[in-house]
Each structure stands twice: as structure tokens, then as C-alpha cells.
Amino acid sequence: MKRAKKIYVIGALLLAIITATTLSYALYQREVDVDVTTISGEMICDIEVDTNDNYIENNEAYFYIYVKNFENRDGINYLSATDVDYTITIENTGSDQGLFRYVDEEGNSSEEGVETLTIENSIGNDEEMTKRIRIYVSGTNDLEQNVDFKVSLDAVQKDMEG
């Protein structure tokens, strides 16, 4: 009889320990789940290219690229929900090869012209902002020539912890 009581008490204790452990883990798991948060929103980074035959300085043609962190839809401006890192690439597409260099409003620039120009920068989301970049285009020879080019944009959400 005493042995049966011991087994019964040990079984009850084991059941109580298992139940307490399961409840503790469940409470812990619930706390971990509550602490997980995410932020999501629309990332906006657009460019506009402004070319004009009259854009010439010191016998060198140029054009503008405007980088914007907002978008106008139906008369309402929507601001990007996140900061954005962007890369603009300008490259030749025609048979006449041009050389590209740039100067932006922040003082960034490239010294020499290159056939494929890559500009890396970022734009915040505190307020509506338009960054203006002036791209100079020169021919590879001194003769007048038409330079066909392509402008592409690659934009990603900025690393918020970096």
C-alpha cells in the first residue's frame, strides 16, 4: 500500500511539473510574440530627366536628373514611407559614344567623363524632397555628334540600423 501511495505521489508531482513547465513555456512564447513588431509602407523614389538643346555650358552639353521621394496622384502628394538608397546609371545606347560626368547640389561630382556613369546616393523621407543632378555630356571626339543614352534607376529601402 505504501508503495502505491509513493507511485501516486511521484506521478502527481511529475504531472504538476510537466503542467507548470508547459504553462511557463506558453507564457514565455506569448511574451515573445507580443514583442515582435514590423513597419511597412510604400517606398517612393522616382526620377525625371530634363533635356534641352539650350543646356550648354563652356561648349559642353548637359541635362538634369531630378530624384524625388514623393509622388503626385490625383492632385495629392504621397511621401515615401522609408528612406531610400538609390543608384542611377547612365550609359550609351547609340553608335556615337558620349562621356558622362556629374555635379549634384550636395557637392558630389565626378572628375572625368566615363562611358557608363554610376551615381549612388540616398534620399530621406522627413519631407518632400527633389534632388537635382546635372549630367555633362561630351563627345569622344571634337566633332559635333548625337549621343543616345539610357538612364536607369535602382532603388532599395535604406538600412535603418546602419
Image (cartoon, grey):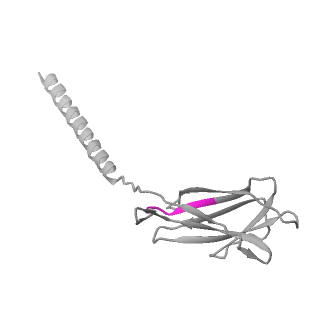
Depicted 143 relative to depicted 56: above or below: above
Q: Residue at x 33, y 49 (%)?
A: 32
User: Which quadrant is the N terminus positioned in?
Assistant: top left
Depicted 76 relative to depicted 8: above or below: below
Q: Quadrant of residue 48?
A: bottom right
Q: Residue at x 81, y 58 (%)?
A: 97
Q: Residue at x 30, y 47 (%)?
A: 28
* Relative image position of residue 100 (x, y in whole percent): 75, 64
Q: Is residue 3 visible?
A: yes
Relative placement, left or right, of 80 versus 17 is: right
* Relative image position of residue 113 (x, y in whole percent): 79, 66
Depicted 4 relative to depicted 142: above or below: above
- Looking at the image, which residue sits at the far bottom? 58
User: Which quadrant is the C terminus positioned in?
Assistant: bottom right
Relative placement, left or right, of 70 versus 148 is: left
- Give the magenta range: 81-87
Q: Could you say which is closer to the camera, residue 61 or residue 14?
A: 61
* Relative image position of residue 85 (x, y in whole percent): 57, 61
Q: Quadrant of residue 121?
A: bottom right
Q: Quadrant of residue 10?
A: top left
Q: Is residue 162 visible?
A: no
Magenta highlight on residue 27: no
- Looking at the image, which residue sits at the far front? 53
Relative placement, left or right, of 85 versus 7 is: right
